[in-house]
Amino acid sequence: MSSTGSEIAVKPQGTAQRTKTRELWRRLKKDKFAVAGGIVLLTVIILGIAAPLLTSYNPYDAVLDQRLLPPGTGGHLLGTDQMGRDLLTRLFYGARISVMVGFVAVAIALFFGIIVGLFAGYYGGLVDTIFMRGIDILMAFPYVLLAIAIIAALGPGLFQAMIAIAIVGIPYYARIVRGTVLSLREKEFVEAEKALGAGNLRIIFKHILPNTMAPIIVAATLDVGWMIIAAAGLSFLGLGAQPPTAEWGVMLSEGRNFLRVAPWVSIFPGLCIFIVVLSLNLLGDGLRDALDPRLKE
Amino acid sequence: MSGALLEVKDVKKHFPIKRGLMSKNAGCIKAVDGVSFSVHKGETLGLVGESGCGKSTTGRLVLRLLEPTSGEVLFEDKNIYRLSFNQMRQLRRDMQIIFQDPYASLNPRLTVEDIIIEPLVIHGIGDSHSRRQRVKEMLDLVGLSSYHGSRYPHEFSGGQRQRIGIARALALNPKLIVCDEPVSALDVSIQSQVLNLLMQLQDMLKLTYIFIAHGLNVVKHVSDRVGVMYLGKIVEIADSEELYRNAMHPYSQALLSAVPVPDPEIKRERIILTGDVPSPANPPTGCRFHTRCPQCMDICRLEEPALRPVSDKYMVACHKYQ
Ligand SMILES: Nc1ncnc2c1ncn2[C@@H]1O[C@H](COP(=O)(O)OP(=O)(O)OP(=O)(O)O)[C@@H](O)[C@H]1O
Ligand SMILES: [Mg+2]
């Protein structure tokens, strides 16, 4: 055995991991709706990043004699808003902010939610009681009120809105993770790890965490959409991003005063939110199926 | 003591019953209530008894997967309950467990290779090449092929999964393995394959087994000695041949009468136990079996019989013999 050691080509480490990712990718590709959702989402992100290359207008340049031009007139594909700014340009730039806010808020909420859920569920007892009572208190507030209270404390603004939404999201992830952990920690494969001499952190992060990922990733993907809506909602209420920022929620809010005479000013940002959230939901559903090894054909 | 790999001395495990938020402690379940036995190197000790009598709890106490309420477990003359976390971790290389449920005992997110490598990684044994080599050896040893390594547990049948669990338990070269009903979840046709594998491995690797089962028929083929448990206690422990030939405790007799006899010449009277197993939270006074015992005497209701030797290697806890 030892003599053949040098002849056998040693498989590079991480091969197993890469095959798993490829396998996930292969299964995701089969789901037409998820693929469509992914493509739309990717397109929106690219349009946001490449915004300066795609348009010659500046999103903040007010041109007072070109206010509220209907779509297709005066060289403005989607028309202009009440300040004479090119709507398409503002939508491109808005994609950066709105989509980013959704992802960052979910990432923050996920991080803390997962940590709280893992430790509360795994250790139980006092750790659980302390963490989960805190979570209960957070959940007792209607989420809009909670977000408003947080913004009242931090002051209005895009960043504050993002933090507020993230905090609102933490309890949901903590709950999902804790529930899954409670059932996982009684599983015999966890006991087998203990019998092998594995420490708690190894068990938590290597064996329990990956088994909570499927429900979490699905919930998170679906929630990016929810958080985009929530951030836009806060902006709409004047608590998030502030005018003249090119953010979809702000644009929706500004346009509502002109709904009768220039509906496009509100309709297009609303449509953008709708499309992005829909594609996120399709992608989330596809991911859920692809992540479940039992659904493998 | 001499020759015993493992010695269990009066071990108890009481689980507190928690009711609601306020009442701290509403009594306790006496899952294991004073169990003693020893296991010698290379032998198989069978543990049998009805569901809920504390077999699995005993197995977990032996491996210190549960902390005992009281008592001692000596492994190679060391009291394992006195060991520090790190000493215990080292000792875990010598004692392993095979579980009943082949579906719950393997992490569904790991490949078979990752599952079997796990013990080697935890104990920092070898480099990635020698570990892979070891996985191949282990798969071979339990009758699987090396290409199975890249697959996930759900791609295997129950019997194959049980083999994977056995490979994981063997990867560290343990001395003692607790087999907690390793075949009860399998088809009858697969059961004997897995049992034979366990016995071959025992011969090859000089393993010592504690073999848990709820019927005597499975234990019969594999055990050198058998302990019969009832409500958290051992009521009879003896060489398995003797116990099968001539069980003394009325409970063992009843269990034995449920085992089908291959030889139609031998007529065994079927003893049917009446009544349910009493709750381990509130076991009967005196002998725990007296509520269901067909041969109950007055003293049985009052006094608990101790587990006493009736001959060289035969111990029984019953007033009939004291
Ligand atoms: N963690 C626990 N907390 C509370 N009670 C427990 C716990 N584990 C076991 N018990 C109780 O202890 C008793 C013995 O359980 P144990 O699992 O040891 O039985 P068993 O003999 O292995 O039964 P089976 O044949 O069903 O596996 C049962 O009444 C059970 O409900
Ligand atoms: Mg059991």
Image (cartoon, coloured by chain):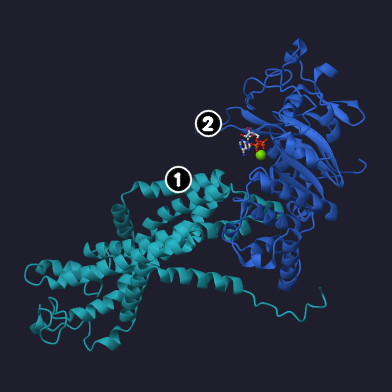
Chain colours: A cyan, B blue
Q: Is residue B206 visible?
A: no
Q: From mark 1 to mark 2, how far is it between C-alphas?
A: 19 Å
Secondary structure of the residue carrying tag 1 is helix
The N terminus of chain A sits in image quarter: bottom right
Where on the image, by quarter, is ligand 1?
Answer: top right
**What residue is pinned by disc 2?**
B19
Q: Tag 2, which chain? A: B
The crowd level at tag 1 (other Cα within 10 Å; few <14, some 14-19, many 20+) is few
Measured as percent of width and height from the top left, residue A137 is found at 39, 47
For this orientation, the residue located farthest to the top is: B298
- Image position, residue A68 (x, y; %): 10, 77
- Location of mark 1 (residue): A133
Q: Residue drawn 86% across and 47% down? A: B42
Residue A146 lies, with reference to residue B229, above or below; the image says: below
Q: Against B187, is B134 above or below?
A: below
Mark 2: secondary structure = loop
Q: Depth check: A116 or A240 in front? A: A116
Q: Which mark is residue B89?
A: none
Q: Amino acid at mark 2?
A: Arg
- Looking at the image, is mark 1 or mark 2 nearer the viewer? 2
